[in-house]
Image: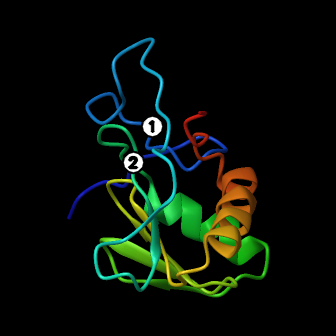
Amino acid sequence: MSTPTGSGASGFVNSSHLLPPTGATFVYRKLRLCSNGGGIEAVPDGVLPLDLERIRILLVGRGIPVVDARVMLIVSLDPEVTISKAGRLLFKTPDHAAAKRAFDRLRGWVELPPLESG
């Protein structure tokens, strides 16, 4: 049985082998329509290991229903969002504005990196 990794207040994994190099800065690429056109995705620029257990605890603490599927969380927001262990977010809507609102809420609650500017 593996030992869980601890984390701080954010949803980032606090384990030396999973943290980005010192001084590395992560951003999410712009929100974009996913390949099948059924949702909007936010993909981090590089691998962004997330502590899904910590994120689940933070969201459930706010009264937000979360399904823990081990390698991803399914979060009952409007719209529903899937959060992968590698940091990819999939908003289950083709509405860019709704996905952006959900991204902004999530970012504030679990301290995700920002969207790239420009």
Task: Tell me the quarter of the image containing the C terminus.
Answer: top right
Question: Which residue appears farthest toward the top when viewing the image?
Answer: 23
Give the percent coordinates (x, y) of residue 38: 41, 86
Q: Kindly identify the residue that appears in the image at 65 percent across and 87 percent down.
A: 65
Give the percent coordinates (x, y) of residue 82: 46, 76
Q: Kindly identify the residue that appears in the image at 39 percent across and 48 percent down.
A: 5
Question: Which residue appears farthest toward the left when viewing the image?
Answer: 1
Q: Which residue is mark 1?
A: 14
State left or right for residue 51 relative to residue 66: left
**Residue 118 — which label?**
none
Residue 52 vs 113, above or below: the answer is below
Give the percent coordinates (x, y) of residue 59: 68, 71
Q: Residues within 10 Å of mark 2 (few under 14, many from 20)?
A: few
Give the percent coordinates (x, y) of residue 57: 62, 68
Q: Kindly identify the residue that appears in the image at 78 percent across and 82 percent down.
A: 63
Q: Quadrant of residue 117?
A: top right
Q: Amino acid at mark 1?
A: Asn
Q: Which residue is mark 2?
A: 5
Q: CA distance from mark 2 to mark 1?
A: 6 Å
Of the numbered discs 2 and 1, the one sitting upstream in the chain is 2
Q: Residues within 10 Å of mark 1 (few under 14, many from 20)?
A: some
Marks 2,1: beta carbons within 8 A: yes
Q: Secondary structure at mark 1?
A: loop
State left or right for residue 110 relative to residue 30: right
Chosen colour scheme: rainbow
Q: Secondary structure at mark 2?
A: loop
Residue 48 vs 75, above or below: the answer is above
Q: Kindly identify the residue that appears in the image at 62 percent across and 70 percent down.
A: 99
Residue 16 vs 75, above or below: the answer is above
Question: Which residue appears farthest toward the right when viewing the image?
Answer: 62
